[in-house]
Amino acid sequence: MIAVVGGGISGLSAAWYLSRAGLECTLIEKQARLGGVIETGYQEGCVLEGGPDSFLAAKPEALELIRELGLEDEVISSNDSQRVTYIWKDRRMIPLPDGLMMMVPTRIAPMVTTPLVGWRTKIRMGLEYFHRAPAHAVERSVAEFIGEHYGQETVDFLAEPLLSGVYGGSPQALSADSVLTRFVEMEKKYGSLTRGVLASRRNASPGGAIFRSLKHGLGSLVEALRRQTGDRMRVVHGEVEALDPAAGGYRLRVNGEWLEAAHVVLALPAYASSRLLAPFDAELARLLATVDYGSSMTVTLVYRPGHLDHETRGFGFLVPRGDVRFIRACTWAHRKFPHRAPEGWSIVRCFLGGKGHEAVLDLSDEAVLEGVAEDMVRLMGVRGAPDFHRITRWRRGMAQYTLGHAHRVSQMRARLAAFPNLHLAGNFLAGIGIPDCIQTAKAAAARIRAAC
Ligand SMILES: Cc1cc2nc3c(=O)[nH]c(=O)nc-3n(C[C@H](O)[C@H](O)[C@H](O)COP(=O)(O)OP(=O)(O)OC[C@H]3O[C@@H](n4cnc5c(N)ncnc54)[C@H](O)[C@@H]3O)c2cc1C
């Protein structure tokens, strides 16, 4: 028997790739539902995502999986013709300048005219074109890396809000090598990030939308994985409380009973795998426990036609750290993707929490809604209650790729080599996004297939 522990996208993908190889598995999930942080709700014709709402098209693993499941007709693209994001600064919403790739400017005119940064930063951004690669590669935080290239204002008003939307983490703690890998590579090759981005754009084939999703939400990916693995995946709902070596493999204690397995895939947050692996290898458990996780929550507000007294433009906005009270970022879900709401309805998806703001998760729903309502007035001038709402808390849901992360993961992999039938998958190994998780699961399934 093969045991897959964890029924999020990582565990489900591992089960799927095992089933494609003709192998059966038992998937053990402690919650009553599958999907992990993927949680799609439906109400009055609206698709409401409590966790992730999309995935990056540039990383192929999610689209490949969707094709294998026959869901390609369900794929939708973000409305990139409307892809403007606003930053809250000086008590107003300022659009991110055209031609900005993450925090790298590639067009002169929009950068010169934007009130988002001052003249000193603008001049520095221009001079970055002549930046030389450092003589010795040393790991730097995102704040150090972007600060070196474009200055502190770019860290505060671009890097921090943009990355906190993805990781909920601080640029001082996150490792540039791990979260801005492509830009670090560009620096090695070109010295200047602006030159690197311009060169990569010249060589790139014209791509489609940046984000993709599914018409009926990402929950339909979870359902398809469940349905199509069929009899090859037996699902047990219960918490794996212990994992022991046994003759021919391992045994796992679930709901007080022992299950035997030849191979085990731990598709769990690093801290949960750490607890189970402590009796095997204290050092591996210690390394896993050092992966920090951030907590966040989404508050989705839904307005019937005419009930939101605000003209939503672009995809939404970001609030720099210094100005956060409750809302850190906001997406107009009905504008970002088609098929999210009936004509004329508005879905405002607010992100709260993240590093340094986790206390908000302990507030009651009433207190959270009150704080969000105050922010809606402060940030958007929106008064009036939504027609309905949905609040989802994600405690320790976001792996933080902090300084030293890549080194710690390579140490984990080295120690894991001593346990050939034990496999790790999840969002702390190769990237936090859905395609990254699928990639780790696919690799685990391939190793098992090769061994069977
Ligand atoms: C709010 C939010 C928004 C996000 N937005 C995006 C986005 O738009 N695009 C994107 O690509 N990524 C996004 N991400 C990241 C991405 O969704 C996650 O990294 C990914 O879904 C994690 O999947 P996973 O299977 O590795 O982990 P999880 O989804 O955390 O699943 C792990 C599962 O293991 C179970 N479990 C834990 N311990 C045990 C145990 N002992 N026994 C049995 N079961 C156990 C848990 O109950 C859980 O179901 C977002 C994440 C969050 C939290």
Image (spheres, rainbow, N blue to C red):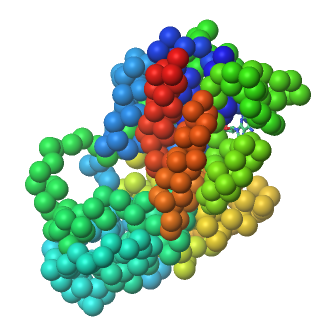
From this view, report whether residue 318 is shown above or below residue 138.
above
Frontmost residue, 140 versus 305: 140
Can residue 223 be spotted in the picture?
A: yes
Frontmost residue, 216 versus 256: 256
Q: Residue at x 49, y 53 (%)?
A: 410
Res 86 → quadrant: bottom left
Q: Residue at x 41, y 26 (%)?
A: 66
Q: Measuring from the top left, give residue 21's x and y in whole percent.
A: 47, 15
From this view, report whether residue 157 is shown above or below residue 278.
below
Horizontally, residue 52 falls left or right of residue 129, namely: right
Frontmost residue, 154 versus 431: 431
Can residue 155 be spotted in the picture?
A: no
Residue, far bottom: 120
Q: Measuring from the top left, give residue 42's x and y in whole percent.
A: 60, 32
Q: Residue at x 64, y 71 (%)?
A: 356
Q: Measuring from the top left, give residue 169's x and y in whole percent.
A: 55, 65
Quadrant position of the N terminus in the picture: top right
Q: Measuring from the top left, give residue 274's x and y in whole percent.
A: 70, 48
Res 150 → quadrant: bottom left
Ligand 1 in which quarter: top right
Q: How many marks?
A: 0
Residue, far right: 256
Q: Residue at x 36, y 28 (%)?
A: 64
From this view, report whether residue 225 is shown above or below residue 204.
above
